[in-house]
Image (cartoon, rainbow, N blue to C red):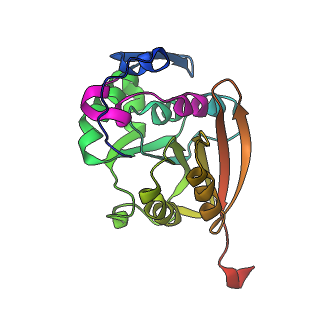
Amino acid sequence: MALVPYVENSLPALSKLHNSSARFRFADHDLSLAQDWKKLGVAAVVWDAAVVMCMYLELGRVELKGKRAIELGAGTGLVGIVATLLGAHVTITDREPALDFLTANVKANLPQHFQESVVVSELTWGKGLEQYPAGGFDLVLGADIIYLEDTFKSLLQTLEHLCSDTTVVLLACKIRYERDTNFLSMLRQQFKAEEVYYEKERDIHIYKAYKLPPKGDL
């Protein structure tokens, strides 16, 4: 979501983020995602949460074939690309400055016959939501998008708009700070949310959420 350029960091643990590409194999396809930390910062590198989300999608615990999915804060597009390869019709979104980079990754990693199943689109949370059908998606995906407290209200507003009462929301994240837990508390005011997966090595949690009915309907 946030396009924050970062100064080069010499810590070995972060060195992979400065590589020009990141390679994976998901859904029986070899993927090579371009990265550009210096230009676009956090929006242009593959974070562990995206990798773990793709692992979870491959487990088949969420139906993807023929489903309408949208990825929020897509960054490099890894999650949306894998969801497309697994059979979903995917709208992959991020803020406008990241779109050219995102589009190039999508085109480079999806075979031609998958291209008609994916759309790359601009979405700044909380703004221009009328461009997207209210409750129009079966699945909403977000990997490592819970980290800027200033965006929490607009993210929740966006989820509220995109989801019907049957939409599944999947959020992959680290729980780094108290504010991350606060977001989950905010989410649970509007959604029923539970942890469905935890990857210990990378310390990534995946939460599944469903929109709560209006209070008058409870």
Residue 165 visible in the displayed image: no
Location of residue 45 (image quadrant)? top left
Describe residue 89's horizontal placement relative to residue 97 as left or right.
Answer: right
Does 2 appear above or below 107?
below
Does 199 appear above or below 160?
above
x, y percent for residue 170: 61, 46
Location of residue 189 (image quadrant)? bottom right
x, y percent for residue 156: 51, 62
- Which residues fall within the magenta stretch? 35-54
Location of residue 42 (image quadrant)? top left
Which of 46/118 is in front? 46
Describe residue 46's horizontal placement relative to residue 190 as left or right.
Answer: left
Q: Is residue 41 magenta?
A: yes
Which of 62/10 is in front? 10
x, y percent for residue 109: 39, 22
Which of 183/63 is in front? 183
Describe residue 218's horizontal placement relative to residue 52 as left or right.
Answer: right
| Main secondary structure found in the magenta portion | helix
